Image (spheres, grey):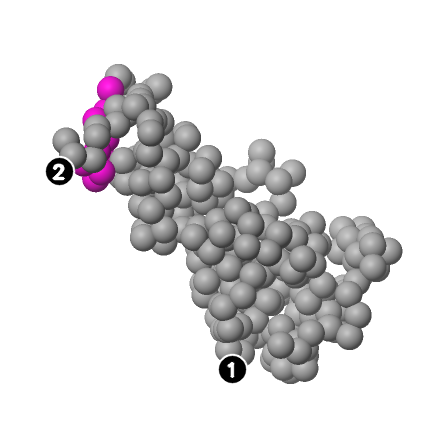
Amino acid sequence: MKGLVEIPTQGALQGAYEALQIKKEPLAPESIVLWSQWARFDPRLAEILVTHLGRNWRTLMPVFLNELLQRVPWPSAFGVLLYQAQEFGNLTKGEKLLFKKWIDCAMANIAPAPSQQFFIGLRALGGKLMREDAELSTRPYNQWGYLGREVLFNKMAQNTAPRGDTREKTMIPRRARLAALDALLENRTRVTVREYREKLHNAVSVRQAELDFESNLRLKPQGQTKGRTYAVRSKRRAK
C-alpha cells in the first residue's frame, strides 16, 4: 500500500485545526485533500474536516478536487468524510440531493480501498477494538472499503442539531446488528434498548433498535413504553 511521504506532526495537525475552524477566507483545495489523508491518523481532524465540508462544499470545485484526489495515496478516504458530511450535515432535503450529485462528481472513478482499518495506528493489532471495528463497521466506511464505526460529527453541534441528526440514523447493517444483539443477550436475564444502542455506539436509531428487539424471539417486553425492559428467554425456550 502506497502511503504518505510523512506522517503529520502534532504541530501540523494543530495548524490544520486552526485553518479549518478559524480562518474566514476560502481554503486551498490542495490543503483540503492533504488533510483528508492526515485524517486517517487523527479522528479529531477527521471530525473537524467533516464539519467544514458539510458547511463549505459549495465553494469547492468537484472536478478539480477529483483531479487532486487521483494523485494522493488514499483518495477513497475522502469518500468516507463526504458520506458523513452528507448524512450528518444540517442540510435540507433539496440540499442533500444536490450535495449527492456534487459528491458523485468529486469521487468519480475513485475505487474503494482494499479492506483495511480507516484509522491508522489507533488500535492494538488483533485487539478487541480492532475486532469490533470489523464486526460493527458502518456504512460510511464500508462503502469506501474501510473498517470503522466512529461517527465523525461535531459533538458540540449535537445540542442544536435538528431532528434527523445522529440519533435518527442507522449506520450498521442488519447482519452485524443482530450478531451484536446475540452477544449482548449471552448470560443476561434482562436487557434494554438503551444498552443495545450503547453496545452499537449509538449507530442505530431508537426506532430500528426497537424493531430489532420486537423481531427477536428471545425477548419478551415488560412494562410501559417509557422505561420498558425486555426479559431474555433461554435459547432452547426461544426455539
Q: In which quadrant of the rendered image does the N terminus lie?
A: bottom right
**In the image, what residue occupies the spot 44% across and 51% down?**
136
Image quadrant in which the C terminus is located: top left
Q: Is mark 2 on a helix, strand or loop?
A: loop
Q: Does the magenta stretch include residue 69?
A: no
Q: Kindly report which numbered mark, 2 or 1, lies closer to the viewer in this rendering.
A: 2
* Amino acid residing under circle 1: Asn
Mark sitting earlier along the chain (2/1): 1
Residue 21 position (above or below residue 185): below
Q: In this view, does 223 lie above or below 5?
A: above
Q: Residue 109 carries which label?
A: 1
Q: Residue at x 67, y 57 (%)?
A: 121
Check disc 2 and report the residue beneath it.
Answer: 239
| Label 2: how many Cα within 10 Å (few below 14, some 14–19, many 20+) | few
Residue at image point 77% right, 65% down: 7
Give the residue drawn at x 20%, y 35%. 235
Nearest the eye: 87 or 129: 129
Q: Which of 168 and 38 is in front in this view?
A: 38
Mark 2 and mark 1 residues within 8 Å of each other at the beta carbon: no
Q: Is residue 162 left or right of residue 3?
A: left
Is residue 220 part of the magenta span, yes or no? yes
Q: What is the span of residues highlighted in magenta in the rendered image?
A: 214-222
For residue 154, above or below residue 16: above
Where residue 16 appears, as percent x and y from the top left, is: 79, 58
Residue 70 point in image, percent of width and height: 63, 81
